[in-house]
């Protein structure tokens, strides 16, 4: 059974700092990995999708890497801003011939302070 | 562009009452559809997914059921709610297997 772990559970940084969020998974037979952002009481916003054949993806100040063999992914946020404050979730997918099942980590709660 | 809607946004129901949550997707055809639950202190858990009309797969045994009466409509139901059904219910869609999933705004359900 796939298990996804995110470290740290919570993180507080001053504005402008670069930071790294970590995600690890136990079964390397994944189809892809997705990073999401969740604001309090809201749905999930997709940030980046990395296919299993890829090593990294970039979108603006965000860069996500994937090392499938070691079961790890990192989300790098450059020059953090207060608006980046949210919970960040990673999820790995397993394609079973009948859908795309995502297994989620429990998230990293990020607070960027002025 | 594609959009996904969920309603109601919030719901307070007594134990033993029925439930119907609705999710609709606009701007795409034959999407894969998913229901997730986010319970307090727990991660997101996949409840049901559907690859087509009338095709529903259940991930965990529970008090809930799902139906897909139309291509872009996904409904989550219960005949009798339990306290443990409380949580934040999220609907999602994807174009194909293995593609990016997009989530709706969610429904906050409190069972009292």
Image (tube, coloured by chain):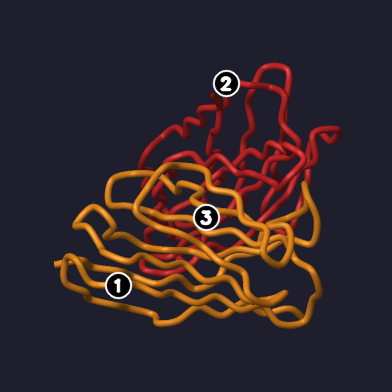
Residue identifier under label 2: A26
Labelled disc at residue A16: 3
Q: Work out how far the residue at label 3 is from the one at label 1, CA to CA, in angstroms.
A: 49 Å
Q: Work out how far the residue at label 2 is from the one at label 3, CA to CA, in angstroms.
A: 33 Å
**As drawn, B69 above or below A15:** below
Q: Nearer the viewer, residue B28 or A25?
A: B28
Residue identifier under label 1: B18
Of the two numbered discs 3 and 1 in the rendering, the one whose residue sits closer to the viewer: 1
Image x and y of residue B51, in percent: 73, 57
Labelled disc at residue A46: none
Q: Nearer the viewer, residue A70 or B75?
A: B75
**As drawn, B61 above or below B22:** above
Residue visible at 54% across and 42% down?
Answer: A19
Secondary element at image label 3: loop
Give the image quarter of residue B16. Answer: bottom left
Q: Nearer the viewer, residue A83 or B45?
A: B45
- Crowdedness of circle 2 by 10 Å Cα count: few (<14), some, many (20+)? some
Image x and y of residue B56, in percent: 61, 56
Q: Which quarter shows the C terminus of chain B?
A: bottom left
Secondary element at image label 2: loop
Q: Which quarter shows the N terminus of chain B?
A: bottom right
The chain coloured red in the image: A
Residue visible at 44% across and 54% down?
Answer: A87
- Compared across the picture, whether A100 is left or right of B6 comes to right
- Crowdedness of circle 1 by 10 Å Cα count: few (<14), some, many (20+)? few
Q: Residue furthest left?
A: B112
């Amino acid at each position: 059974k796939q298990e996804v772990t995110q470290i740290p559970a919570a993180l507080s940084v001053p504005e402008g700092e670069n930071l790294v969020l970590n995600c690890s998974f136990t079964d390397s037979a994944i189809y892809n990995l997705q990073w999401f952002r969740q604001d309090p009481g809201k749905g999930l916003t997709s940030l980046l999708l990395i296919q299993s054949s890829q090593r990294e993806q970039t979108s603006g100040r965000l860069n996500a890497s994937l090392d499938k063999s070691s079961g790890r992914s990192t989300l790098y946020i450059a020059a953090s801003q207060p608006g980046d404050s949210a919970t960040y979730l990673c999820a790995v997918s397993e394609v079973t011939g009948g859908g795309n099942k995502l297994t989620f980590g429990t998230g990293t709660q990020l607070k960027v302070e002025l | 562009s594609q959009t996904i809607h969920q309603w109601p946004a919030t719901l307070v129901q007594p134990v033993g009452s029925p439930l119907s949550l609705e999710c609709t997707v606009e701007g795409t055809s034959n999407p894969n559809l998913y229901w997730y639950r986010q319970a307090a202190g727990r991660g997101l858990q996949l409840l049901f997914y559907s690859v087509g009309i009338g095709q529903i797969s259940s991930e965990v045994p529970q008090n809930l059921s799902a139906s897909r009466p139309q291509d872009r409509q996904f409904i989550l139901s219960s005949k009798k709610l339990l306290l443990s059904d409380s949580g934040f219910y999220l609907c999602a869609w994807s174009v194909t297997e293995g593609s990016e999933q997009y989530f709706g705004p969610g429904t906050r359900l409190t069972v009292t």
